[in-house]
Image (spheres, rainbow, N blue to C red):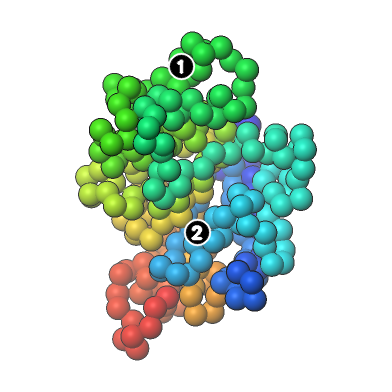
């Protein structure tokens, strides 16, 4: 399944409008995520980044339009087709969502317990291998309360990788981390992308991380409720003709007091 960014789109977001009830959060979103790239979804708080993520993984249904992963509609997939789809991607939620009563090893084992018939020893070996991939194998028998915030995020990524998906969704991976720990997580994302060919979709508002990890990005605008920029972050910062886009990527205040 893995490949280079030039192998074609693995995710297609086609004219998607999303929201809650009658309230539209974002509208007419159309973009593709290419296989093997790190794709970042940007925007200020409240612009709909996490809502878009929920629609992309099938937790919410778009008000209109559709999202496809590897050719499968994430909303309409049922039965064996949905089971196959769920094994193709992993998700790291903003808080990490680790179970506090379990060790990191036991947390990483959870998808293996649910989706495989491996023996217990084999599950442990796979979980240890995933923890080793993210650099925290030595902490396998510690609980989340016994490790740092950065290690929790790494353990959550390891759990998302347990079934060897080709696609990972990360929701605010740098949230709550100090700059050094955040930079280490950025380096891990690039390592996993380049060495293992994993496709990443990362929701964030952290520009420094975006410049470090992103092959491409989209910028969601809270006022127009749609995408106002798509491309390489540095190109958008240096060459966009839209003043709102330039201000966002240069971290400049809006002279009129608005938000992007």
Residue 240: quarter of image: bottom left
Residue found at x 41% / y 36%: 99
Give the labeled residue for mark 1. 124
Residue found at x 69% / y 67%: 63
Residue 254: quarter of image: bottom left
Q: Residues within 10 Å of mark 2 (few under 14, many from 20)?
A: many
Which of 48 and 101 lies nearest the eye of the viewer? 101
Q: Position of residue 135 (x, y in %)?
A: 33, 28
Q: CA distance from mark 1 to mark 2?
A: 32 Å
- Marks 1/2 in contact by CB < 8 Å: the verdict is no
| Secondary-structure class at tag 2 | helix
Q: Position of residue 1 (x, y in %)?
A: 63, 32
When the figure is inspected, residue 51 is found, relative to residue 94, above or below; the finding is below
Give the labeled residue for mark 2. 50
Please name which of the two marks, 1 or 2, marks the residue nearer to the observer.
Answer: 1
Q: Position of residue 116 (x, y in %)?
A: 62, 22
């Amino acid at each position: 399944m893995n490949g280079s960014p030039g192998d074609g789109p693995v995710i297609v977001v086609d004219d998607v409008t999303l929201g809650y009830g009658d309230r539209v959060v974002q509208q007419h979103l159309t973009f593709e995520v290419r296989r093997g790239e790190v794709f970042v979804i940007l925007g200020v708080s409240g612009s709909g980044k996490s809502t878009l993520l929920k629609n992309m993984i099938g937790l919410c249904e778009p008000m209109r339009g559709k999202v496809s992963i590897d050719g499968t509609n994430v909303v309409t997939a049922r039965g064996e087709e949905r089971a196959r789809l769920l094994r193709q991607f992993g998700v790291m939620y903003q808080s990490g969502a680790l179970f506090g009563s379990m060790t990191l090893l036991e947390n990483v084992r959870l998808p293996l317990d649910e989706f495989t018939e491996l023996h217990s020893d084999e599950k442990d070996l796979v979980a240890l291998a995933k923890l080793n991939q993210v650099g925290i194998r030595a902490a396998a028998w510690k609980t989340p309360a016994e490790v740092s915030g950065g290690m929790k995020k790494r353990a959550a990524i390891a759990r998302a990788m347990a079934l060897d998906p080709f696609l990972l969704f990360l929701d605010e991976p740098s949230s709550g981390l100090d700059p050094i720990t955040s930079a280490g997580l950025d380096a891990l994302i690039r390592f996993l992308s380049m060495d293992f060919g994993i496709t990443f979709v990362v929701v964030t508002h952290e520009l420094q991380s975006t410049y470090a990890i992103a092959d491409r990005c989209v910028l969601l605008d809270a006022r127009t409720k749609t995408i106002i920029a798509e491309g390489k972050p540095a190109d958008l910062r240096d060459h966009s003709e839209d003043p709102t886009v330039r201000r966002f990527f240069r971290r400049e205040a809006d002279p009129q007091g608005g938000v992007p």
